[in-house]
Amino acid sequence: MTEYYVTAFVYFIQQGDQPLVKVGTTVDQPAKRLAQLQVGNGSKLRLLGAIDIRAAGAHAGNRIEFAKLARARESEIHREFADERLSGEWFKLSTRVLAFIEQAKNC
């Protein structure tokens, strides 16, 4: 029997060369979400990093619970960078936000 790695992610996707970053969640691999978002987007999107909720120490019994934990972590990040928010899930890619992403990637 195959054992599946069940988790969810908070991802950070940059729009083109612009200083914009989308902070969102997915239960799929972040690269798959990137491909979904790229469809219909005129700017080349780039995955800057992602937080694997399970690898970050969260415990949940199934995909739905991991998704809820990812959304909660996403909300914390949105609040933390509220002064950088441009619209919805899009934020200014400031040095503070970029430093957070770099730190989150290395955890």
Image (cartoon, rainbow, N blue to C red):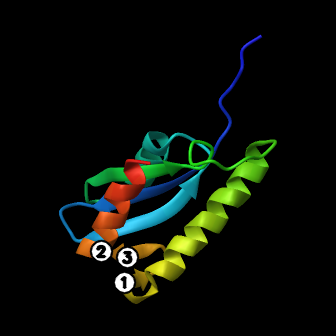
Residue 18 to residue 66: above or below: below
Q: Is residue 12 left or right of residue 1?
A: left
Q: Which residue is mark 2?
A: 96
Cα–Cα gap, marks 2 and 3 = 11 Å
Residue type at numbered disc 3: Phe
Q: Secondary structure at mark 2?
A: helix
x and y, in percent, of residue 20 in the image: 29, 71
* Residue 96 x/y as whole percent: 30, 74
Does dot 3 land on a helix, a strand or a loop? Answer: strand
Image vertical order of residue 80 relative to residue 73, above or below: below
* Image marks 3 and 1: residues in contact by CB distance under 8 Å: yes
Q: Give the residue type at disc 1.
A: Glu
Q: On the image, numbered disc 3 is attached to which residue? A: 91
Going from N to C along the chain, the mark reached first, 2 or 1, is: 1
Q: Residue at x 68, y 36 (%)?
A: 6
Disc number for residue 84: 1
For marks 2 and 3 on the same chain, the one whose residue lies earlier in the sequence:
3
- Do the CB atoms of the residues marked 2 and 1 lie less than 8 Å apart? yes
Task: Find numbered disc 1 in the image and state the secondary structure of the residue it sits on.
Answer: helix
Give me the disc on residue 31: none
Distance between mark 2 and mark 1 Cα atoms: 9 Å
Q: CA–CA distance between discs 3 and 1?
A: 5 Å
Residue 39 seen anywhere in this rendered image of the structure: no
Q: Position of residue 106 (x, y in %)?
A: 38, 47
Which residue is outermost to the right?
61
Residue 19 showing in the rendered view: yes
Q: Residue at x 28, y 59 (%)?
A: 42
